[in-house]
Amino acid sequence: MNEEQSTTGVIRFSVSLPPKLVKEFDEVWKEKGYDNRSRAAHDAFRNFISEHKWAFSLTEEVVGIIVVVYYLDKPSLLNRIVEVQHSFEGIISSTMHIHLTRNKCLEIVAVKGKAKDVRELGEKLSTLKGVKETKFAVTTP
Ligand code: NI
């Protein structure tokens, strides 16, 4: 990664993104009332980090859901998603599958277990190629 530290204490680096994602991002930050892309990216980075740093300790018991949106373009993806879920069968109470469009699905995975395991499950799902997004909504029982 090319990084350049300026005298103002910020780091500039280049990021490669698909044009469609940039277009969508630009639309959203303008709609939200940001002045520029950097300010919006700053907050987006912050949210990305805080989403990872939960308010729960890793050993704490949590209940909730993981929402996963993915594309069916890759035939092996569905199998991999099911495989990952089977390897966490101890913390998954149930799964609801919703067909969004011809090639896009949404799954709601109900979870109950240690925060560490719930997060690991979410991360394993979110890093599969073809998974568009994952969201957590968890709380303590
Ligand atoms: Ni489906």
Image: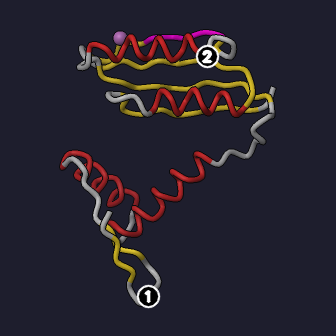
Residue at x-position 73% and y-position 32%: 139
Q: Position of residue 128 (x, y in %)?
A: 40, 28
Identify the residue at image location x=61%, y=24%: 65
Q: Amino acid at mark 1?
A: Thr
Q: Farthest residue to the front: give it.
A: 1
Along the line of sight, the residue nearer the viewer: 58 or 97: 58
Compared to 8, does 31 lie above or below? Answer: above
Q: Quadrant of the N terminus?
A: bottom left
Task: Tell me the residue at 56%/18% (across/down).
Answer: 109
Across and down, in percent, residue 86 comes to 55, 10
Which secondary structure lies at badge 2? Answer: loop
Rendering quarter of residue 58? top right
Residue 112's tag is none
- From the viewer's perspective, tell me whether residue 116 is left or right of residue 20: right
Q: Residue at x 47, y 83 (%)?
A: 9
Q: Nearer the viewer, residue 53 or 96?
A: 53
Q: CA distance from mark 1 to mark 2?
A: 46 Å
Q: On the picture, is 118 further left or further right than 108?
A: right
**Relative depth, front residue between 33 and 114:** 114
The circle on residue 88 is 2
Q: Which residue range is magenta in the image?
A: 93-97
Q: Nearer the viewer, mark 1 or mark 2?
A: 2
Where residue 138 appears, as percent x and y from the top left, is 67, 32
Count neighbours of disc 2 (C-alpha within 10 A) and say few if under 14, some if 14 to 19, many if 20 or more: some
Q: In what element is the residue under mark 1?
A: loop
Residue with the mark numbered 1: 8
When the figure is inspected, residue 130 is found, relative to residue 5, above or below; the finding is above
- Regarding ligand 1, which quadrant of the image does it lie in? top left
Q: Residue furthest bottom?
A: 7
